[in-house]
Image (tube, rainbow, N blue to C red):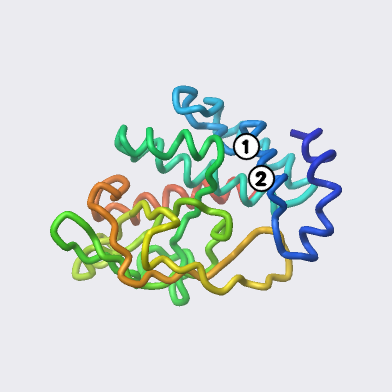
Amino acid sequence: VQKFAQERIAPLVKSMDANSKMEDSVIQGLFELGLMGIEVDQKYGGTGASFFSSILVIEELSKVDPSVSVLCDIQNTLINTLFQRLGTEEQKETYLPRLASDMVGSFCLSEAESGSDAFSLKTSAKKEKDYYIINGSKMWISNSEQAGVFLVMANANPSAGYKGITCFIVPRDTEGLHIAKKEDKLGLRASSTCVLNFDNVKVPESNVLGQVGLGYKYAIGMLNEGRIGIAAQ
């Protein structure tokens, strides 16, 4: 990891920061070294290592460019972990091999008025037959420019308050999903942070990750682990 960071990331740090863009070669290198599927089970193409290993990798990458470590952190401590812990076998087989080899994931929780407060999000998911219709907006969403799949927290039962919050798998090419404004940040500029808009986004019931109404518990658990990754940066 140290060699990769020094030889392949370090020469690009200034240009990536100036251009507010992560080089594809850096992302490809992370996948080639298995750094985007550190805790993913080997049967799905991951390295099957520990959470502590993920933290050590994040720390090492951060010494050279924390923007790169953000990409790696979210992939390992949020996206992959949620799929491994909550996914059905079909969901795992569909996404984990890709997440370990060539697909970036993004975690969509924060909104204009809610930040990391999972209890007050406004994005809704209305049940229609065997699918859901998602409407709303997310802000400050990291990895969104590169992501091929989004884990979206939306409320499937607003009358139940936070106990209606549910996690949905939304592929990038889903109709009605719009990756909008990219934030011009003071730091971590190579790490993409965008606004996401959901305009009648239709996802099948099979794209619910975990149980309906338990998204708030999943979000809190993942954010607690994610904060360890942030500390490692």
Residue name at image x 71 percent, y 45 percent = 26
* 230 lies left or right of 167: right
> Could you say which is closer to the camera, residue 24 or residue 122?
24
Residue at the left extreme of this rendering: 129
Q: Which amino acid does label 2 sit on?
A: Ile
Position in image of residue 158 (x %, y %): 23, 69
Q: Where is residue 39 in the image (x, y as percent from the top left)?
A: 52, 32
Indicate the position of residue 212 as horizontal and vertical percent values. 24, 52
Give the side of residue 55 with respect to residue 174, left or right.
right
The quadrant the N terminus occupies is top right
Secondary structure state at the residue bearing disc 2: helix
Which amino acid is tagged 1? Phe
Frontmost residue, 80 versus 100 = 100
Residue 11, compared with residue 90, is above or below; it is below
Query: In this view of the protein, can residue 63 be seen by the observer?
Result: yes
Q: Name the residue under label 2.
A: 27
Mark seen at residue 112: none
Outermost residue, bottom side: 113
**Which numbered marker is on residue 31?**
1
User: Please, is residue 93 above or below residue 15 in the view?
Assistant: above
What x and y, as percent, mark residue 85?
38, 37
Q: Nearer the viewer, residue 231 or 53?
A: 53
Mark 2 crowdedness (10 Å alpha carbons): few <14, some 14-19, many ≥20 = many
**Can I make out residue 188 in this image?**
no
Who's the residue at 41% across and 53% down the image? 171
* Residue in front for this viewpoint, 72 or 117: 72
Whether tag 1 and tag 2 are in contact, CB under 8 A, the answer is: yes
SS for dot 1: helix
Give the alpha-carbon distance from disc 1 to disc 2, as whole Å. Answer: 7 Å
**Mark 1 nearby-residue class (10 Å; few <14, some 14–19, many ≥20):** many
